[in-house]
Amino acid sequence: MKNILAIHTGGTISMSQDEKGGVVQNDENPIDNNDILGLSDINVINDELMNLPSPHMTPETMLQVTNRIKQAIADGIDGVVVTHGTDTLEETAYFLDLTLPNTIPVVVTGAMRSSNEIGADGVFNFKSAIQVAASDEAKNKGVLVVFNTGIYAARFVTKTHTTSVDTFKDPIYGTLGTVDHDQVVFAQQLIGSEYTAINRVVDNVYLLKAYAGMTESLFEALDNDQTKGIVIEAMGAGNLPVVTLPAIKKILDRGIPIVLVSRCFSGSAQPIYAYPGGGIELQNLGLLFCTQLNGQKARMKLIVALSCGKKGKDLKDYMANALS
Ligand SMILES: NC(=O)C[C@H](N)C(=O)O
C-alpha cells in the first residue's frame, strides 16, 4: 500500500460558509478525514502545516512547504499532495517545481466551493490528487496540479476564472492527462526538471503590468537599492510605452535584473519589434526575455534564481527557457 502525505495549507478547500454566507476559515479542516475519501488501497497521512487563505501565502511560507516535502522524501514517503487556496496556487505549485528534486509525485490541489456549499468540489479534487500522487506514471513529470479531473504541469497552469470549478488551464500545452472516474491517464510526457536547492528567499522582487499610457512613475518608485528584481508583463509580443525607458535604464544601471514576459494570456515575449519601446530595443537595453511563463510564475522563478545567487549569463539562460 502506498503512503501519501497530504500537507494542508488552507484555502477554500479547508473553509466553509458561515450563517451570513461569507466563506471563512475553520478550526478543523473538513477534508482532514480519510473516511470521506473511500480509498482503501492508499494510506493517507494528513499534516495541517498551516491554515492560510492563499492571498496570505508568501515565498517564505512556500519555502516551508518545500522543506516539509524534502523531509517527507527523506523519510521515504511515496507521494505528496498539497492542498492550497486557488488564488496563489499556481505560484506555490511552480515554486515547489523549482525547488524540489523530481523524485516522487508532488500534486497540488484546492477547491472553488467551500466544504458546505452546494456542489462543493474539495473532496473530489483531493481524492483525485491523492490518486495521481499514488500513480507510478506521475513520477518524473515535475510538480503537478490536479483540478476538476485535469492534470496540469505546475509550470504552465494558471487560474482562469474567479468562481468556476473549471478554472485551472494550461493555455499553451493543455492537460497532461485526466483523472477519469478513478483511472489516472497521462496523455503527455513532460518535462525537464529545473531543480535548484535554496534555503532562503530574497524579498523585494516586484511584478508590474504595462498598460496604455504607462509612464515612468512606477519604475521611478522602484529605482532604489532595496529592489532586487522586477518582472514586467509587457504588451503583446514584448513591447513597452517608450516613455518608460529612461527610468528602466536607470534601474538596469544599478545592476537590478528586469525580466520581460507578455501580459497576453498565451504566447511568449520576444524581440520582434524595432520601433522605439519595441522588444528589440528592450533586449538591447538588457531586459531578460522569459518565454512561456506568465508574470506571477516568472516572478517566482526570478526569486528562486536570485535566492541562489544566479547572475549575468547564468541568470539570463535560467530565465530564458521554461522548458529546459
Ligand atoms: N478557491 C480558493 O481557494 C480561493 C481563496 N480565496 C484562496 O485562495 O484561499
Image (tube, rainbow, N blue to C red):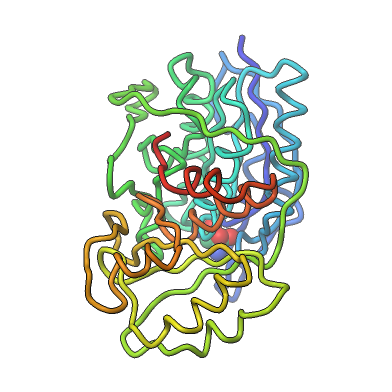
User: Is residue 319 found left or right of 204 in the rendered image?
Assistant: left
- Residue 47 percent location from the top left of the image: 74, 36
- Residue 177 percent location from the top left of the image: 32, 29
Q: Quick one: quadrant of the N terminus?
A: top right
The answer to whether residue 116 is seen in the rendering is no
Residue 45 higher or lower than 109, as above or below: above
Q: Quadrant of residue 83?
A: top right
Count of numbered marks: 0
Residue 214 higher or lower than 47, as above or below: below
Q: Quick one: quadrant of the C terminus?
A: top left
Residue 2 higher or lower than 6, as above or below: above
User: Is residue 266 found left or right of 216 in the rendered image?
Assistant: left
Q: Quadrant of residue 73?
A: top right
Q: Residue placed at 31% from the left, 65% from the top?
A: 238
Q: Residue placed at 62% from the left, 27% from the top?
A: 101
Q: Nearer the viewer, residue 128 or 20?
A: 128
